[in-house]
Amino acid sequence: MFFRYCKIYLIATFLSLLSGFCFSYPTQAITSDPLLSMAGIEQLIWTQQITSIEQLLPLLPVSYRSRYVLAFHSRSLQSASYLNPRVIFFGNNAKFMLTFNGSSDQVGFNALELAEFNDLTKTFSYQEILFPTQLTTTPDKDALQVHFSVKNPDKCLACHGTQVRPIWDSPPLWPGMYGEHYREQLSAKEVAGLSGFLAQQANHPRYQFLAQLDIWRNSDTFSPSHAAIYSAHETESPNAQLTQLLSRLNVERIIHQVTDDVQFNAFSYALLASVSNGCSSLNDYFPRTWNPDFQQQYQRFSTADEQNLARELTRKKSRDSTSKSVGGSIAKDSSLVDFRFIAELGLRIDTSEWSMQLEKNAADFSAIDAIQSKLEQRLLSKISATDKELINVYYYHSYPGKNKYCAYLEKRSVQNLAQQNMQLLPVWSDKPSGVNTVATVDDAATIPARVHDLLSICAGCHTTGVAPFIPFNNAALLSEKLKQAYSARGTLQREIMYRLSVQAAEHRMPPNMNLTQEDQTLLEHYFQQ
């Protein structure tokens, strides 16, 4: 009986490890709640005659309102500030998210943004609900004046891409979010901002419905003390929790896209080898007749990958409100360069929107728990369904050198691909850079690198439909537009100069970063020229 108990305990423990880490938040199950879907929210609004966000929030489950992140700078359609942050509810699995902000002066104040993950199709959908600026007392359903956008409207796809993925930064830095730096104390600005937010929360029309506020008052939430670690009370921050949940869903999205491709069976073993630690050069998993073209293509892809990662790191650091992120790089494994190369080369899948970064081709897949191992396990599960020997040789995967597992993958991959009459076409990343980047500044060779990076940030919103169109990526068009009347302050150039200055306060641009005096001077000089 004792041994039977031990066996049950070990199985339970193993299953709990597979399910991931435990949150410190309430564990009430909410996945079956009919409200937590786009259709459920819409039905609730109509049946309850809801005309404001304030009326809707208290009807959401408390367990759902207990798990959220707070943004004091936002690149979304909803603006944010330290005192009135953008709230992102993500619940216990991030399969349904809901966002709002807190001040009528903010962009998107009357809008709810919804995101939903479909377990069947492994896809994300986005929707915006606009509430009337003035409440109506009429019981007439059509007079509610609540507007529901179609799923994935153009204004959402401008940022979330044609493949429709979540936008979320990777650790250890989440610019603009309370708890910007992973496992570090909050900055002075964050402490002051969070203190002001918490002081008004209880009486705020919207924030009063947030639950589990103690999490935000506890410094151990962001930087666990030695006592918390020693006592096993250490928990991940809300930012880290959302990263884990979204990265898992993103893996499901990617795996579904890859395994559903007609060429998957031919490239399956090469794909598996590309995410298996210890296996040799990717070139070994392709027929020798492919080698010349393969090596040339891979070198181009790998070089472009390194350049894109460097640009993404620079952009990300520029959005750090504390400006204390220095040095650093993104590991090759975190960019999934080998896996993405095979997907583009063999499956003809455009991987520029695989990561959760706003910018395309910014292939930073860094996560709290490694995404590469998740991909490996999902591929193992898929391939072993028809190849029973694979699981047997997998037991050798951790052996050093060219072990039995890697040798098996090499043999099966070469056999499969040798039977294919394949032509090595250019991979997607060989397209002109403007095709799969959010915004490409056209005069990069004639302006300082720092100005180029800052203009790319501006163009990321103002040339993609997220913000009013301003051609920051085209010097000739911008030169003409700067002279035109734009606002009460005069020309577009005068409006930009004002928005760059500290006098613009909450409306200062870019909205997701604090410009240094040097950056401001560089941009002012560029626009004057």
Image (cartoon, rainbow, N blue to C red):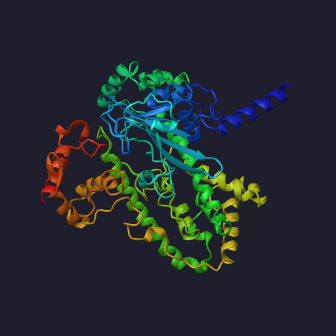
Residue 412 vertical placement versus 78 (above, below): below
Give the x, y percent position of residue 5. 81, 27
Where's residue 39, x and y in %? 58, 41
Residue 204 higher or lower than 417, as above or below: above
Tally the numbered discs. Answer: 0
Q: Residue 167's x, y, as percent?
A: 45, 47
Q: Residue at x 32, y 62 (%)?
A: 440
Q: Nearer the viewer, residue 355 or 374?
A: 355
Q: Is residue 391 above or below residue 429?
A: above
Residue furthest to the right in view is 1
Asked whether, in this view, residue 143 is left or right of residue 514, the answer is right
Q: Quadrant of the N terminus?
A: top right
Q: Nearer the viewer, residue 76 or 339?
A: 76
> In which quadrant will I find the C terminus?
bottom left
Q: Quick one: 370 or 157, which is closer to the camera?
A: 157
* Horizontal relation, residue 404 to residue 217: left or right: right
Can see residue 396?
Answer: no
The answer to whether 389 appears left or right of 348 in the picture is right
Q: Choose top left, top right, bottom left or bottom right for residue 477.
A: bottom left
Residue 121 visible here = yes
Q: Residue 410 at what x, y percent from top left? A: 66, 67
